[in-house]
Image (cartoon, rainbow, N blue to C red):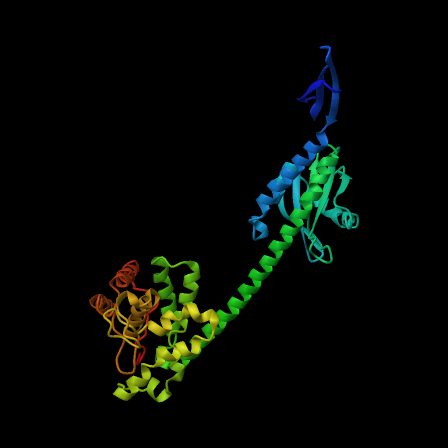
């Protein structure tokens, strides 16, 4: 071919559906000027296209299920129906010894008929990536049932977490079967991930409930020790949380506020009974000891890591807006907002509760005192929210509130 020139042209055309690299035409020009043409390549690339389609669908499935943390967030049945063009998709979850419906998508289907056959089919899908069965006559005649088990490839026992049953009008293609097998692996891992996440959430919930039950037990014990204020911790906690919610605290922050309110007087465990339950006024030495209870609370609670975010109220609920409070003499917004809220609630409860040295104040007198102390003892914004809450209930807050407990 010395002295000859050539060029090639690639022609891509669709022919009866699949994509072909149909021909590569080579043109040769000889020295004598003669031109020759011949086809150098003819290649069917439909298999390549199928692989690309499969990869694209699996990637879309991965993007859909990746953000999910719980099973309820996994939108599986719709994704499977898109892959297979199924008439109906049912997602089943095994609990104890039976399969139960978790999600359904598509046309109505007699799930009881499928449920009756799942135990029999279960023996067949142990090793198979999917199972294809003629639809029972009493389910949907002239249809096929495709059973897709979801396993976690990372589990040593190849545990099946769930199974999907798909009703299709005609037998699925090999490409669709491959797609389902690939999707099942992704879904199996996602189900395992959400299962583990939910287990952790349940364990955390149980642990949190145990913590809170312990805290409430401590609060009741403190109230029983200080007989004149029995029930005080519960009352002040409920109203403090109510005000904090109105002032924009998040749900997680409200959890810590609740714990701090319940434990606000935990430091009084270090105060002698002779001082704590003294029927008359305290002398200067006794007051000095009483005023150590916020610091004692911090020393008691700080080593408990999960209670660290709840320290604001036990430590700072005796600080005042004008800086004359204790133990640190904080002023204004230097005092944590949770403690400023609690201070209002706490004093109101003290004023409206009977004490050995005085009778409970009437509601209106106590509210007037709270109003007068806005900007002095109390944060004015907190007082505003507190009074608005009282105005919504002709009988005042549902529970009296206290902190100046008998010798707060």
Front-lying residue, 67 or 252: 67
Residue 139 visible to the viewer: no
**Viewer-side residue, 206 vs 173:** 173
In the figure, 197 relative to 107: above or below?
Answer: below
Residue drawn at point x = 59 percent, y = 46 percent: 65
Residue 69 image point, x, y percent: 56, 53
Quadrant where the image shows the N terminus: top right
Q: Is residue 322 visible?
A: yes
Viewer-proximal residue, 402 or 43?
43
Which residue appears farthest toward the left when viewing the image? 372
Q: Considering depth in this image, is 300 or 132 the residue closer to the camera?
A: 300
Q: Quadrant of residue 339?
A: bottom left
Taking the spot 72% from the left edge, 43% from the top edge, the residue there is: 147
Q: Position of residue 282 (x, y in %)?
A: 27, 86
Q: Quadrant of the C terminus?
A: bottom left
Q: Position of residue 161 (x, y in %)?
A: 68, 53
Instruction: Judge from the rendering whether residue 304 lies leftward or rightward of residue 152; answer left or right.
Output: left
Pick out the residue farthest to the top: 33
Taking the spot 50% from the left edge, 70% from the top edge, the residue there is: 211
């Amino acid at each position: 071919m010395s002295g000859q020139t050539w060029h090639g042209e690639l022609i891509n055309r669709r022919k009866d559906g699949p994509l072909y690299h149909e021909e590569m035409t080579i043109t040769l020009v000889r020295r004598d000027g003669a031109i020759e043409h011949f086809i150098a390549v003819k290649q069917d690339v439909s298999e390549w296209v199928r692989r690309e389609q499969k990869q694209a669908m699996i990637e879309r499935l991965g993007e859909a299920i990746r953000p999910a943390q719980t099973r309820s967030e996994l939108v599986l049945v719709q994704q499977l129906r898109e892959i297979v063009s199924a008439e109906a998709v049912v997602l089943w979850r095994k609990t104890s010894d039976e399969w139960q419906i978790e999600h359904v998508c598509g046309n109505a289907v007699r799930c009881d008929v499928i449920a009756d056959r799942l135990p029999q089919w279960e023996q067949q899908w142990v090793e198979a990536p999917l199972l294809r069965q003629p639809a029972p006559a009493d389910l949907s005649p002239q249809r096929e049932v495709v059973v897709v088990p979801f396993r976690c490839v990372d589990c040593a026992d190849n545990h099946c977490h769930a199974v999907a049953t798909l009703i299709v009008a005609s037998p699925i293609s090999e490409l669709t079967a491959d797609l389902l097998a690939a999707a099942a692996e992704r879904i199996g891992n996602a189900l395992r991930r959400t299962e583990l996440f939910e287990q952790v959430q349940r364990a955390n919930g149980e642990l949190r409930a145990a913590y809170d039950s312990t805290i409430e037990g401590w609060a009741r014990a403190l109230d029983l020790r200080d007989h004149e204020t029995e029930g005080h911790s519960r009352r002040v906690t409920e109203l403090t949380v109510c005000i904090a919610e109105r002032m924009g605290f998040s749900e997680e922050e409200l959890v810590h506020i609740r714990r701090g309110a319940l434990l606000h007087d935990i430091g009084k465990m270090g105060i002698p009974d002779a001082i704590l339950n003294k029927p008359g006024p305290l002398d200067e030495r006794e007051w000095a000891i009483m005023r150590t209870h916020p610091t004692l609370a911090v020393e008691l609670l700080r080593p408990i890591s999960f209670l660290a975010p709840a320290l604001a109220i036990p430590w700072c609920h005796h600080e005042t807006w004008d800086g004359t409070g204790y133990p640190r003499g904080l002023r204004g917004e230097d005092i944590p907002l949770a403690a400023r809220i609690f201070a209002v609630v706490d004093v109101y409860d003290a004023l409206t509760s009977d004490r050995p040295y005085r009778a409970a104040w009437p509601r209106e007198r106590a509210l007037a005192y709270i109003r007068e102390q806005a900007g002095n003892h109390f944060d004015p914004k907190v007082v505003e929210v507190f009074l608005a809450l009282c105005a919504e209930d002709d009988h005042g807050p549902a529970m009296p509130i206290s902190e100046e407990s008998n010798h707060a």
